[in-house]
Image (tube, helix red, strand yellow):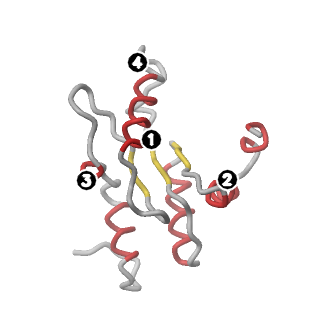
Amino acid sequence: MTSALASLGDEDLLRFATADARTVVTEKVKDFERIVRTGLRRASHHAGVVFTSPRRFHRGRLSYPDDLVVALRSFLADPPVETLDWVRWLVLRRGGPAPSAAEWTLGPRFGLRLAYERLGNGRNSAPP
């Protein structure tokens, strides 16, 4: 199954994950941002996308992949309440308690614009 998933294109992977009610976790922000935006315009839904960053979860650090696993576990402990069409950035917090759902942030330009478009205003621009 893993090799079959690896051979899928990004759009097909998102469709496959959605059909199985799974979320995609990816570093490919530009590609999936485009796919999600295009899907919204076509009224095509997805089961969620979590963006990560190779700078935030650097493979050269001694803490990798443990830091990524901890962040994902924290995310899973308090997942988004939405069931469709949500996008989040995975946040690395050093020390302290795990962040709550209210503390999970969307990307500054993408998330705000996506949330605004989902309100049904019919425009593709961010609010003032």
Q: Quadrant of residue 111?
A: bottom left
Q: Amino acid at mark 3?
A: Ala
Across and down, in percent, residue 46 comes to 56, 63
Which of marks 4 and 1 precedes in the sequence?
Answer: 1
Would residue 44 be found to the left or right of residue 37 on screen?
right
Looking at the rendered structure, which numbered label has been put on residue 52? Answer: 1
Q: Nearer the viewer, residue 97 or 126?
A: 97
Would residue 68 be found to the left or right of residue 92 on screen?
right
Give the Cα separation between the discs numbered 1 and 4. 15 Å
- Seen at 54% across and 55% down, the residue is 32
Residue ID for mark 2: 13
Across and down, in percent, residue 39 comes to 57, 70
Which of marks 3 and 4 precedes in the sequence?
Answer: 4
Rendered-image quadrant of the N terminus: top right
Residue ID for mark 3: 102
Looking at the rendered structure, which numbered label has been put on residue 118? Answer: none
- Structural crowding at the residue carrying mark 2, measured as other residues with C-alpha within 10 Å and reported as few (<14), some (14–19) or many (≥20): some
Across and down, in percent, residue 35 comes to 57, 62
Q: Amino acid at mark 1?
A: Thr
